Amino acid sequence: MQRKRLGIGQRSLIFFFERNMINENKYTIEDVMNSLRSDRPISIPMLFQLSDLSPDELDHFCTEWSGIEEERRRVIIRHLADISEENFQVDFSEVFSHCLADEAPSVRMASLDGLWDTDRLALIDPIIRLMESDADTEVRSLAAATLGHYVLMGEWQQIPYENISPIVERLIGQIDSEETPQSVKRAALESLGAASHLRVSSLIEQAYDEGDPDMQISAVFAMGRSADARWLPIIIDEMLNPTMEMRIEAARAAGEIGSSDFIPNLAELVWDEELEVRLMAIAALGQIGGDLAEQVLQDLVIDPEASDVHNAAIEAIEEMGWLDSDIDLSLFDWENDLDNDAFPSA
């Protein structure tokens, strides 16, 4: 699942708007569940009240949840996942955790989507179980993909490294097993990309060399996650691949590796016939940064023939400037700044 990246100003506005939505629309958990069980349209303000549930509120939610019709449960959890994607204040993790055991695969998948950036270590084992034994292959694949976030956090020392060792071993186990569906193997390989395990490079190389187009796409994704310049020649070659999906992944991998050697090739991809490829190439240039990348993006902004990507180029330039800045986010007092007229009142 591709996540929408927000600019700093957008994040601030969302923070301001959603914080006030939560504060000004306080419902009891009984109010919320009565509304969700009804056949009325789903109320977004009501959904915000499912953030940071107390133990008693969570018990009430769990008791009432199964009484909601399956399709409505799916829509509710999908709404919560979408809210979580663009919001750093709400926390629906308790709801998502409960719904990992929902009888509907679509609800389990939406819950996994909602946990895409969780740092809760208690969820590692349940997600591993879904990857290894869920009855639905799509759920297994998404669980394997979700575990990749934990691998990244471990490699970045955001969680204790010992917590990701069993994840890496179980992901490798899925790749090694002949009974694992290919979609699960692909997701497992992608999640392993960032891992420093001794076998990861050989697994990526093996998947790429086997020649299956889908596995090659996942191998290139994993190459990007590895941030290893050894894959540079392969990624450059794949930017010319006739398959759109591969060109997209090659551009993504270039941005994640961040080598300026990719810039000439990305400069060609910004004129690809497929808009999705162009957008990914633009995002990659923003990640790589530097004068040459900025010049390519500036040229796009003023070129009338590139009007369909002007906004993307502007955002990439803005992000490039933000990433190159020395601003320390920890110096901001978001609460006081927002309260002291950081935004004009209506």
Image: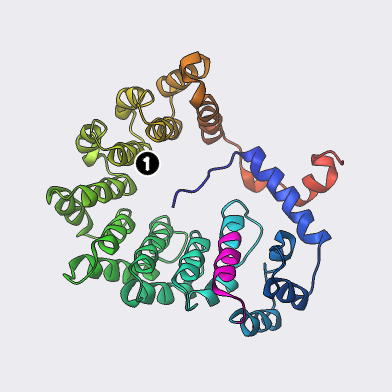
The residue sitting at 33% across, 58% down in the picture is 191
* Residue kind at label 1, given as amino acid type: Glu
Query: Which residue occupies 37% across, 23% down?
Result: 271
| Side (left or right) of 63 relative to 238 | right
Give the magenta-colored segment's residue range: 67-79
Quarter that holds the C terminus: top right
In the image as oriented, which residue stretches furthest toward the front? 39
Which quadrant of the figure has residue 147?
bottom left
| Picture layout, residue 23 above or below residue 56 | above
Pinpoint residue 103: horizontal percent, then vertical percent.
Answer: 47, 79
Picture quadrant of residue 23? bottom right
Does any portion of residue 303 appear in the rendered image? no
Q: Which residue is mark 1?
A: 256
Between 159 and 346, the one lying in front of the other is 346
Q: Residues within 10 Å of mark 1 (few under 14, many from 20)?
A: some
Instruction: Please say whether residue 71 is one of the residues in the magenta stretch.
Output: yes
Q: Does the stretch in magenta take in 64?
A: no
